Amino acid sequence: MESIKILDNCTGCKKCLKTCPISAIVIVDKKAQILEHCNLCAACVSSCELEAIKIKRIEGKSTIKINDYQGIWVFAEQREEKIQNVVYELLGEGRRLADKLWVNLSAVLIGNNMESNCARLIAFGADKVYLVENSLLKDYQGNVYTRIMVELINQYKPEIVLMGATSIGRAFAPRVAAKLSTGLTADCTSLDITEERQLAQTRPAFGGNIMATILCNNYRPVMATVRPKVMKKKEEDQNRKGEIIKIFPDVKEEDLKVKILKIVKELESKVNLEEAEIIVSGGRGIREPKNFALLEELAATLGGVVGASRATVDAGWISHYHQVGQTGKTVCPKLYIACGISGAIQHLVGMQTSQCIVAINKDPNAPIFQIADYGIVGDVLEAVPLLTKSLKEML
């Protein structure tokens, strides 16, 4: 834990105000004051020539015995008795991490009549599957799922717990972390193991302007959520063998805080970016909304769909269903064509795992070219029609 303090030698020069990225400093009676929403980023400390700002670390007292915790768990999220795709992606990444640590990888599957799914979880990398079944657990119930997960973690003590950053995962993971008094890093884009056997969790910070790597040294388990399509799933190996541990919790009707009467599915949007194999995305470089028609023609020729940067969505040029990036969809198509997209980190984290990236931009120094497999330096409005014409002649 850390605290921040303004020392008496502060003169109220206001330099720290200009460096604070979240406007958490005000000047009162010629002296800086820190507001409650300060996140202790320390940007103000380096800006103060008088060294009038001090961040002090307060060591928390952890009763956790780190060495008691071992193994990696993946929460196997299911909906309507179907395992979600992000689970297989997490198993692929979890398998890599578990092999580095020389520990087991386990999946935790909570639901009803789910035993038939266990073999597939093992085939995608799990050594063990904790199968928790009860007729009342068919659909996600926050309080009961949290109680069960916390009890399992306290009993078996995994050192790392991974969940998908889905609508369920984003609600479930914080509840579990809070009950366990441990750390949680949300929306990770990269995971790795350090030389000290710590989980290094990398995620965008400050609106995506920097990438922060986070460690949780003193508490266990270390928890992280990962957005769908960020990690790659491994090949399914139906010859893998694993252990299924069946658990039948005592759950009663009165334990449920809410009763689910009916599940109404959201109407599917006109574009399914997350499952698309070919995406043609447009950014500010296409100049005006009507030019998305050029991208639509190219996408149609390739049998793909149209994506977009946040800037074009915010400008009202195209529906938010098309947005790719940190605040949009995370995608992993076979082919991603970025048209007039400069390559801000907010966009890159949503598409950088694409198998093949083609960038079209008139600026040869655009960041998008650093991750592109192929680049075209030129005017999008000239290059895209020529590309579409050539493809039509070939196909």
Image (tube, rainbow, N blue to C red):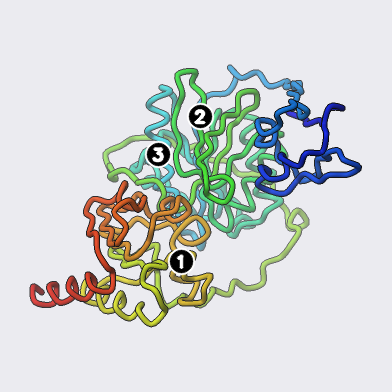
Q: Is residue 108 shown to the viewer in this render?
A: no
Q: Is residue 67 left or right of residue 127?
A: right
Circle 3 residues within 10 Å: few <14, some 14–19, many ≥20: many
- The residue that mark 1 highlights is 323
- The residue that mark 3 highlights is 93
Q: Is residue 18 shown to the viewer in this render?
A: yes
Q: CA distance from mark 2 to mark 1?
A: 30 Å
- Of the numbered discs 3 and 2, the one sitting upstream in the chain is 3
Position of residue 78 measured from the top left corner of the image (x, y, whole percent): 50, 55
Along the viewing direction, whichever of 256 and 333 lies nearer the viewer: 333
Going by the numbered disc 1, the residue's amino acid type is: Gln
Residue located at (62% from left, 73% from top): 262
Circle 1 residues within 10 Å: few <14, some 14–19, many ≥20: many
- Of the numbered discs 3 and 1, the one sitting upstream in the chain is 3
Please tell me whether residue 153 is drawn above or below residue 361 in the rendered image: above
Position of residue 292 measured from the top left corner of the image (x, y, whole percent): 36, 77
Q: Quadrant of residue 286?
A: bottom left
In this rendering, the label closer to the viewer, 3 or 2? 2
Please tell me whether residue 242 is drawn above or below residue 188 in the rendered image: above
Along the viewing direction, whichever of 49 and 385 lies nearer the viewer: 49
Residue located at (58% from left, 40% from top): 185
Residue located at (73% from left, 62% from top): 258
Q: Quadrant of residue 154?
A: top right
Please tell me whether residue 388 is drawn above or below residue 331 in the rendered image: below
Along the viewing direction, whichever of 146 and 362 lies nearer the viewer: 362
Q: CA distance from mark 3 to mark 2?
A: 12 Å
Residue 199, disc: 2
Please tell me whether residue 309 is drawn above or below residue 14 in the rendered image: below
Along the viewing direction, whichever of 93 and 195 lies nearer the viewer: 195
Circle 2 residues within 10 Å: few <14, some 14–19, many ≥20: many
Going by the numbered disc 2, the residue's amino acid type is: Leu
